[in-house]
Amino acid sequence: EAGVAQSPRYKIIEKRQSVAFWCNPISGHATLYWYQQILGQGPKLLIQFQNNGVVDDSQLPKDRFSAERLKGVDSTLKIQPAKLEDSAVYLCASSLSYWSSNSPLHFGNGTRLTVT
Amino acid sequence: SQQGEEDPQALSIQEGENATMNCSYKTSINNLQWYRQNSGRGLVHLILIRSNEREKHSGRLRVTLDTSKKSSSLLITASRAADTASYFCATDAGAAGNKLTFGGGTRVLVKP
């Protein structure tokens, strides 16, 4: 079974620039998550999709972050404009079940973003 | 604020020793999960324990759950250098069981 694919692996941008991350979940996984992990901290949920619909985006800074999951498969997360505090690893995860407490999350290796 | 908090924040042990880390949480849960994260990689699911379970084993891992104290522990027995990683507990938001919240993690260093 192929894992969760993410690209790019690393990205360095200047503040106020824009950036996009891509994620392809495990085949058949209906639920997709984007997490932000700041160095030394645990992952923080940004947005959760069920198929192509948003389930939870309560912690997504919507003035600068956007995400979409067209056709209910792969997803992109965009930041525009980026701020210094956006420097973090952005992790994509997928799960078979809508109920993440019953179904393990499968994570990609993340995109490490550095904003200078 | 984070639902789960791990303790200690960091742990250094010799190969062959046992490693124990704890997770405390604030509100009622349906299930609790433990994940491992190697440096520069994504998180890997280790074990899920349901609120009606008290103990669960998987290989060299032992997880306990005490819902009265709102705490869980992860024990790694006979540690190996390959166990060097960060370990996170994740709890669901009770009634909203579709949302997992991660703690800050315990960083474990196993010295050969």
Image (cartoon, rainbow, N blue to C red):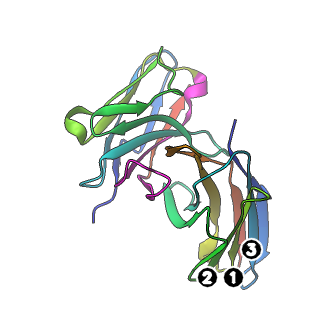
Q: Earlier in the sequence, mark 3 or mark 2?
A: 3
Q: Is label 3 on the same chain as label 2?
A: yes
Disc 1 element: loop
Point 46% across, 57% down: residue:
A102
State which quarter of the image contains the C terminus of chain B. bottom right
In the displayed structure, A23 sits above or below A16; it is below
In this figure, which residue is indicated by the disc labeled 2?
B60
Q: Quadrant of residue B82?
A: bottom right
Which chain does the residue under circle 2 lie in?
Answer: B
| Magenta segment | A84-108
The disc at residue B77 is 1
Q: Earlier in the sequence, mark 2 or mark 1?
A: 2
Point 64% across, 59% down: residue:
B86
What separation in Å lies between label 2 and label 1 (alpha carbons)? 5 Å
Disc 3 element: strand
Disc 2 element: loop
Q: Are marks 2 and 1 in contact (CB under 8 Å)?
A: yes
